[in-house]
Image (cartoon, rainbow, N blue to C red):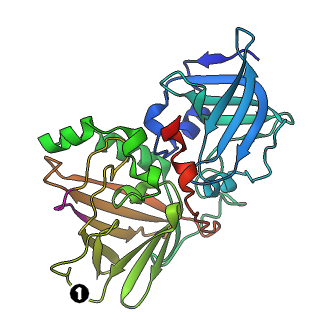
Amino acid sequence: MRQLRVLGIPAALLVASMAGAHHSALIFNRDVVVAFEGTVTQFGWANPHVYIHVETTDETGEIVEWEFETDATPILSRSGWSRDSLAPGDSVLVRGNPDKNGRAHALLVSLTKEDGEVLAARSYFLRKSDDPTNVPSASTLAGVWELDFSDYTAFYRDWDQIELTERGIASRDSYDVRMDSPEAKCIPMPTPGVVVAPYLNEIVIEDDRVLIRNERYNLERVIYTDGREHPENVEPANQGHSIGWWEGDVLVIDTVAFEPHRSPILGRGVESGSQKHVIERYALTEDGTTIEVEFMLEDPEHMAEAFSGTVRWHYAPHFQMQGFDCDLENSMRYQQQ
């Protein structure tokens, strides 16, 4: 049961690792994989993170219990997991990205059971279907949609390059992901960060509004399309106040009045300012399989330039929105480790 450290990460494992949108992901070393055999001691099926405890013997012969953090239950369910996938006493081979602080704590890459079954987050791949040649298509924006993972990684790479103001730099440099993360308190990310939250999205079109739902935190955005303007003294909210209009078949969304949020886009800890303003455009592609979501974020208090880009949502009617209730104790766990 000797622990191994692997510097060259196989591509399949790297995809599973990079896809995780963990609010504590910064504490893991994504360039290293630890791998060892051990025995499951605990399997906590809860949100926003499922935790797996595995006991093993280190190189000195001492018994060590590792804690592996992985995704939320909706993502794992679509990847073939269930609350009965593991039980105390199961023998497993685990691989994970270790905690940078050297603790027996890691982000799960994959887990292999005694019977050879391999479990990993997001192993269902994009737009899974019994018939891969039959790609579903939609005639409107309404329906269930799934993010393209390549856009997820590109979004955060580009966000990391944005030039900040002095205030933005101070906010970033003072950020402690363990203690300051709003998501550790079950507070969702606002747009545009939520646009790339790697969970299912559902769009509902009504006569006077559009609803955009995301599984994470059972989030629902309301976009008023009845011609109203933003109220002068609108009360700030986590997702802001959104109005929208149609330009042909394209939905345009204008959002202001965001509540202060210490990390509105994961990865830097830059605050939201009172002047934050987001414009989004949702356009169905000609073949009906994809929505192209263009976004533009301005926050002159913290950003010296606007942040803009495009991500893609793929039509996924074969998946059901599951959502989850955030368990505060579970969410705050990594703060106390």
* Magenta region, residue range: 273-278
Residue 112 point in image, percent of width and height: 76, 34
Identify the residue at horizontal 38%, vertical 63% (top origin).
292
Residue 250 point in image, percent of width and height: 33, 75
Q: In the displayed image of the protein, which residue is found farthest to the top? A: 60
Q: Quadrant of residue 135?
A: bottom right
Residue 323 point in image, percent of width and height: 58, 65
Mark 1 element type: loop
Q: Nearer the viewer, residue 22 or 65?
A: 65
Q: Quadrant of residue 317?
A: bottom right
Residue 313 on the magenta segment = no
Identify the residue at horizontal 69%, vertical 56% (top origin).
77
Q: Nearer the viewer, residue 241 or 208?
A: 241
Residue 155 point in image, percent of width and height: 36, 47
260 displayed left or right of 33: left
Up-down: is 98 above or below 150?
above
Identify the residue at horizontal 80%, vertical 51% (top origin).
84
Residue 165 at least partly seen = no
For label 1, count other residues whose C-alpha is less than 10 Å away and answer few (under 14), some (14-19) or many (20+).
few
164 displayed left or right of 284: left
Q: Which residue is mark 1?
A: 228
